[in-house]
Amino acid sequence: MRGLGSVLQELGLAETDAGREALQLFATDYHPLVLFPDVQSTLRWLSQKYVLGVITNGEERLQQEKLHRLGLTPYIRNLTTSTAAGYEKPDRRIFAHALQAAGVRPWAGVFVGDRLDVDVAGAQRAGMKAIWFNHWGGQLTADSPRPDRIITRFAELPSALTRL
């Protein structure tokens, strides 16, 4: 919610009826959410071998509701939010907080994210491996963080993990 609220504030819309309505809709309407293909089956399989968690800058209540609505709750053992950790991605401390909660050493942790600047860079600063989920066709530039692996479809994740 922090992201949308900040954008609305920046545009001068936060205190308008439309801005308040947009925030309310964002916080309660989960119908537009859809999983990428193979996410549920991949997480089901991975959860039998690994401790799975989510690290997010989003609000805990909203993230829990999203996981529930998407049917992912059975596979996710840990949810770390920036509010609970006291730090936001890409700060390495939010990743360290999540690793500690999961009982996982940094060198054994792997983070999968779709943002190079926030997800990949933050996880690597915390000593984790990072897989870039490049579902949108982004390009690496000379100054981009270098992910340890790149996947374009979620079904590629198990194979990428074995190649780390």
Image: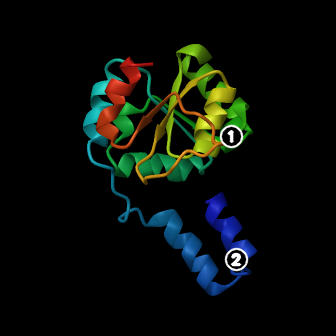
Residue 71 lies left or right of residue 79; in this view the side is: left
Q: Which residue is mark 2?
A: 14
Residue sitting at the far bottom: 17
Closest to the observer: 89 or 74? 89
Identify the residue shown where x is 25% and y is 36%: 41
Identify the residue shown where x is 68% and y is 40%: 90
Kindly indicate the quadrant of the structure image that contains residue 161: top left
Q: Is residue 46 above or below residue 19?
A: above
Closest to the observer: 70 or 111? 111
> Can you give x and y, in whole percent of width and height, for residue 22 in the image?
56, 75
Categorize mark 1 by other alpha carbons within 10 Å: few (<14), some (14-19), many (20+): many
Kindly tell me whether residue 105 is visible in this rendering: no
Residue 11 lies left or right of residue 120; in this view the side is: right
CB atoms at circles 2 and 1 under 8 Å apart?
no
Tell me which label, 2 or 1, sits earlier in the chain: 2
Identify the residue shown where x is 68% and y is 44%: 83
Q: Which residue is mark 1?
A: 90
Identify the residue shown where x is 27% and y is 47%: 37
> Can you give x and y, in whole percent of width and height, for residue 50 in the image?
40, 20
Residue 153 lies left or right of residue 139; in this view the side is: left
Q: Secondary structure at mark 1?
A: loop
